[in-house]
Image: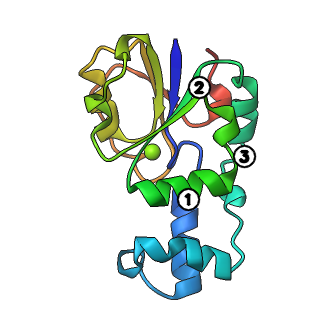
């Protein structure tokens, strides 16, 4: 069994990080060039580890001997930057950064446990009959309802595999 863990809004408080970026640049996130985020963070001495949810490291520690795979969708450089600066790579056997839908990958879904907050990604994963999907209800998409019979949690500490 492989445990696929999402990054944004699951391990990392992306909403708070984006708010911080907007605050230090005095710009809307849509007006900030994604490529300049590492430089802005550096210049303003922003420690990305502070944006990990407080239950993230305890969860990763608890499951570090399992087959953990980080599965994140987005711009490669931006995702890589956040992963590097939060120092969580060491917990994962593999990292998958994709710009495709999470349901369109060359992975064995039926042997996968997926932890994700994004309803659209969850729906895409569900098309492949995954072993288990746990929806993290926090962050940007927490109030979006989906018509799927899956387990919902609002903290990683609620997960017992
Ligand atoms: Mg997410």
Which badge, 3 or 2, is on the more N-terminal residue? Answer: 3
Q: What residue is at 73 percent from the left and 39 percent from the top?
A: 57
> Which scheme is used to colour this image of the protein?
rainbow
Q: Are marks 1 and 2 in contact (CB under 8 Å)?
A: no
For marks 3 and 2, give the one nearer the viewer. Answer: 2
Residue 120 visible to the viewer: yes
Which badge, 1 or 2, is on the more N-terminal residue? Answer: 2
Residue 54 numbered mark, or none: 3
Q: How many marks?
A: 3
Mark 3 and mark 2: Cα distance apart in space: 19 Å
The x and y percentages for residue 39 are 58, 77
Q: Tell me if residue 141 comes above or below residue 154 in the rendering.
A: below
Badge 3, how many Cα within 10 Å: few under 14, some, many 20+?
A: some
Q: What residue is at 29 percent from the left and 34 percent from the top?
A: 146
The x and y percentages for residue 16 are 57, 64
Q: Secondary structure at mark 2?
A: strand
The residue indicated by pointer 1 is: 81
Residue 68 numbered mark, or none: 2
The x and y percentages for residue 29 are 42, 75
Camera-side residue: 33 or 31? 33
Residue 135 visible to the viewer: no
The x and y percentages for residue 150 are 39, 21
């Amino acid at each position: 069994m492989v445990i696929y863990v999402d990054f944004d809004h699951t391990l990392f408080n992306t909403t708070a990080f984006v708010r911080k970026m907007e605050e230090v640049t005095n710009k809307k996130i849509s007006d900030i060039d994604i490529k300049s985020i590492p430089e802005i963070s550096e210049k303003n001495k922003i420690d990305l580890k502070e944006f990990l949810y407080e239950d993230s490291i305890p969860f990763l520690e608890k499951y570090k001997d399992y087959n953990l795979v980080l599965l994140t969708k987005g711009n490669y450089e931006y995702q890589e930057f956040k992963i590097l600066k939060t120092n969580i790579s060491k917990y994962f056997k593999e990292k998958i950064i994709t710009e495709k839908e999470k349901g369109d990958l060359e992975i064995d879904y039926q042997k996968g446990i997926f932890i994700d907050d994004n309803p659209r990604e969850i729906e895409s994963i569900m098309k492949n009959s995954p072993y288990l999907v746990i929806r993290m209800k926090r962050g940007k998409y927490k109030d979006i309802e989906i018509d799927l019979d899956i387990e919902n949690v609002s903290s990683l500490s609620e997960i017992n595999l």
